[in-house]
Image (cartoon, rainbow, N blue to C red):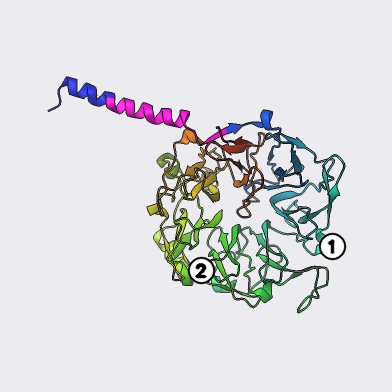
Amino acid sequence: MFNGRNIFFFLLIIILFFIRCNKTAVDDPLFVVLDHTKTGLNFSNTLKPTASFNMFNYMYFYNGAGVGAGDFNNDGLIDLFFSSNQAQNKLYINKGGLQFIDVTSQSKVPQDGGWSTGVSVVDINNDGLLDIYVCKVGNYEKLKSKNQLLICQGIDEDGIPFYEDKAEEYGLDFSGFSTQAVFFDYDMDGDLDCFLLNHAVHQNGSFAARKNFLGTYHPLSGDRMYRNDLNSSPLGGGRVGAFTDVTKETRINSSAISYGLGVVVADIDLDGYPDIYVGNDFHENDYLYINQHDGTFSEQLTERIMHTSQFSMGVDVADINNDAQPEIISLDMLPSDPYILKRSLGENDFNTFNLKIGYGYNYQYPRNTLQWNRGNGMFSEVGLYAGVAATDWSWAPLFMDFDNDGLKDLFISNGIPKRLNDIDSNNFSTTVAIPINKVLPDKGPILFKKMFPGNILTAEVKGGVYAIKEGFKQLNHYILDNQLTSPAIPFQSLVTDRLVEVDTSKWMTKLYYPVY
């Protein structure tokens, strides 16, 4: 039996346990933050909704912009390019010691006042200088701009690169609902082609049987595939010296319900050819395009994967259990906090769920899904088992070995300032969410353990990219995003020599960095 003395010692042990847990979170962080006063990254993606343009007439108003990382002036240091929704895009040159300077004016970055959504970094003309592709929203409401391809024209005597927009000349000046571009050699002819991920907005007829949209092509929504014909005569049309739209020829879906929010390119079936996974928001299926080696793709998601996230956003591919087979993760919006969960609209009711299945859509659930590669062409979904199913309004997953133990860890950026799925919001009020960025260390072949919240900045974050100090690694189109009202936040790991850029489309950017 418990007497007073035993109860005292029992409570003392419990208190010491929690003190130790909190102490670990404070004294042993995986990352430390450096704010803009130390880094010079004072970029802010500030949004100003108006009565004529806000989240009610453009539902992706708070999805954010993007950031690209690369050595733009060839000095061996990683520089950053930030895009903005309503202000100027900015270029920051790394001067060493994690100090950056704004060289936007000197670099002649063109400003069209457009709504930028994503940034891709690529040397498109093989001249040894990095170029920048900026996705934008155009031909919608007040947004009228086109995507930009900023070709580096050289580096001046002060070490500043300067650019000229050549998107029209290269055939990549798309104007519509662009989200992100991925440059890769899909036809294995030695040059970089372009997959352009686009999103959609709800229109009359958007919620209908899936068969109504198959084989259709929307001029503003729907993904695009562009073949690089810069240095060869185009096959089947197009013009020499430009990219050719081969969306139909490659069998890429490009309909009005392609709500593309995430894309990653990887060799899913290990045949030596790049495949594509696309995460689609709302009722449309995700896409798993398997390269057919003949310049076409076969969409095989329902043949290989049983179910997916319902509101798919960020996606990534990595071999998380070191068996040489790639796994796939897709992020959704399921909160782990019961308070937020009960305030949020979640799964469809039973009848609506079955109605979607009857209309030809795949099985979808509003949570993160982790597809475990079984090695036979099939995947088993293990997000709940792995402990990664609920990370709130999540954007960018980044697999990386942050603690150098040989296992890939998982960073998930998340947050949204105005939650359209909030029950009160659906009753015509607004609310501010409480986001927590997640770093999930891999504790085994598939299991992940959530770190203490004190180990990383709590902020609203849309995208992410990580970079090695003497080089950089950009995992997918989820480049670093920026917060809405505060300066940029790079992070640096405390236990590795890796610079981890994590930012938002909404609030700031900070830098977490290693301590030795």
Pick out the residue farthest to the left.
Answer: 1
Q: Count numbered badges in the picture.
A: 2
Residues at marks 1 and 2, CA–CA distance in whole angstroms: 35 Å
Tag 2: amino acid: Leu
Q: Quadrant of residue 295?
A: bottom right
Evaluate if marks 1 and 2 touch, with contact meaning CB atoms under 8 Å apart.
Answer: no
Residue displayed at 64% across by 31% down: 35
Q: What is the quadrant of the C terminus in the image?
A: top right
Magenta-drawn segment? 13-32
Callout 1: SS: helix
- Residue carrying label 1: 169
**Residue 414 location (% of width, % of height):** 54, 44
Q: Residues within 10 Å of mark 2 (few under 14, many from 20)?
A: many
For residue 301, the mark is 2
Query: From where the camera sits, is residue 63 visible?
Result: yes
**Residue 214 location (% of width, % of height):** 59, 73
**Residue 115 location (% of width, % of height):** 73, 49
Residue displayed at 45% across by 45% down: 441
Report the magenta stretch's main SS: helix
Nearest the viewer among 428 and 243 is 243
Q: What is the quadrant of the N terminus in the image?
A: top left
Nearest the viewer among 486 and 90 is 90
Query: From where the camera sits, is residue 359 visible?
Result: no
Q: Quadrant of residue 505?
A: top right
**Tag 2 or tag 1, which sits nearer the N-term?**
1
Residue 21 among those drawn in magenta = yes
Tag 1: amino acid: Glu
Nearest the viewer among 72 and 249 is 72
Residue 330 among those drawn in magenta = no
**Quick check: 66 above or below 304?**
above
**Residue 301 location (% of width, % of height):** 51, 68
